[in-house]
Image (tube, grey):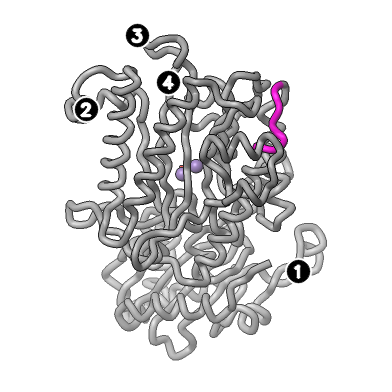
Amino acid sequence: MKHLAVETFINRRQKLMDSLPNQALLLVPSATLVTRSRDTEHPFRQDSDFWYLTGFNEPDAFLVLMKGNPQGEQLLFSQPKDKLMETWTGVRLGQDAAVIQLGFDQAFTFAEIDDQLPKLLNQASEVWMPIEDEALYSRYLVWRQRARAMFKKQANLPSRVVDLSQQLSEMRLIKAPEEIELMKEAARISAEAHCRAMQVCRPGMYEYQLEAELEHEFKMQAASGPAYGSIVGSGENACVLHYVENKDVMQAGDLVLIDAGAEYQGYAGDITRTFPVSGVFSLQQKQLYNLVLKANQLAISLTRPGVSLDELHQATVHCLVTGLVELELLKGDVEQLIKTEAYKDFYMHGTSHWLGLDVHDVGLYWQEGKPRLLEPGMVFTIEPGLYISPDQQGIDPLWQGIGIRIEDDVLVTETACEVLTAAVPKTIEGIEGLMKGESYAATRV
Ligand code: GLY
Ligand code: MN
Ligand code: MN
């Protein structure tokens, strides 16, 4: 299992503080457990910002950074050691070990936060926190009121609260080499799971059985599980973009669309492949599939520093619309069909999103009214699709109910890009070969 070194997290905290004024106070809460049903909780998933800065996976914790604080700049509040509670819910790191193992200057119990924060607030020049977190903002106001009551005429509270999210998003958007290693592992596991699904798929199986195959592979390879709800949609279910019921039996002659990715050390893989349930594409399926593949490969070929995601999307749309006109699924002039957005009946989503600790990762897409330009270290998806809904009017029934998406994860390099998900086939020959049982390695290029 790959892990990031403790120094990585310490350096991230330091780098964040370096970008802020002296005496800036930063507040980042952990995630909390969420009840699933009486006495049971959803599996715990740490808040991505908190994880990025601490590598600490417990709930009920709080990261506090105070630049220039003589008592220590990097502080952690976390659950106390408690023999009885630990018997029920697992070992807690505790405060002593947090200082040693996580590299904090000081660690306090979570209960101490209401005493410590008013004191820190009274020395702070400004406060940086995720300001859209209403619960945190309410607590901040309580700490302020407490500080005012505590310090009375000596009260000297910060006059400015600044949104930390944007500062952190910019850091998270550019992936460091050690993060790229983890993202490659998330992509590798995700790709193997997709190969497994292709290999075991048979008519008569249920969609949830393919979901189980995918998630088996994720867990067997040390991923924590799926990075988002796995989508396994056969036949017309593939036209429902976020179909997660995965309840139907898969029929010979239909395609099945799988959009699933593993989460590894917090980082998401995000792959979509579409393949024939019985292992062989029909003529219509082939025509539409090759069009989506062409758009996917075109966008990949255009990816390099200095290009924007908006340009990639426009090129993708142009490619898809041209193909739809050739197949007579759309009629008219390509430029006009793009202008009037007539193609949105068939392609209604974006081509890309940032990828990282969140599957739809943080980072601005537009800056100063212009699409942001790609830089080395950015990771994002390329995921064109075509969806011919069964309700679509005026379409030859041969096409109705076909949904296709092909999604890869790409890393921007100095000169172009690296496709992190190339290990799962996407050409018709590659997919049909793997499903026929051709040698695994030969078809995974
Ligand atoms: N799996 C979610 C997405 O592709 O955006
Ligand atoms: Mn995606
Ligand atoms: Mn996806």
Cβ–Cβ below 8 Å for labels 3 and 2? no
Cβ–Cβ below 8 Å for labels 2 and 1? no
For marks 3 and 2 on the same chain, the one whose residue lies earlier in the sequence: 2
* Percent coordinates x, y for residue 370 in the rendering: 19, 53
Q: Amino acid at mark 2?
A: Val
For marks 1 and 4 on the same chain, the one whose residue lies earlier in the sequence: 1
Residue at 26% from the left image edge and 60% from the top image edge: 306
| Residue 57 located left or right of residue 287 | right
Cα separation, mark 4 vs mark 2, equals: 18 Å
* Percent coordinates x, y for residue 390 in the rendering: 46, 14
For marks 4 and 2 on the same chain, the one whose residue lies earlier in the sequence: 2
User: Which labelled disc corresponds to residue 394?
Assistant: 3
Q: Is residue 18 above or below residue 302?
A: below
Cα separation, mark 3 vs mark 2, equals: 19 Å
Which residue is disc 1 drawn over? 82
For marks 4 and 3 on the same chain, the one whose residue lies earlier in the sequence: 4
State the image quarter where residue 324 is shown. top left
Which residue is disc 4 drawn over? 388
Q: Quadrant of the N terminus?
A: bottom right
State the image quarter where residue 77 is shown. bottom right
Q: Which stretch appears magenta?
A: 198-203
Tag 3, which secondary structure?
loop
Cα separation, mark 4 vs mark 3, equals: 11 Å
Q: Is residue 199 magenta?
A: yes
Residue at 25% from the left image edge and 17% from the top image edge: 331
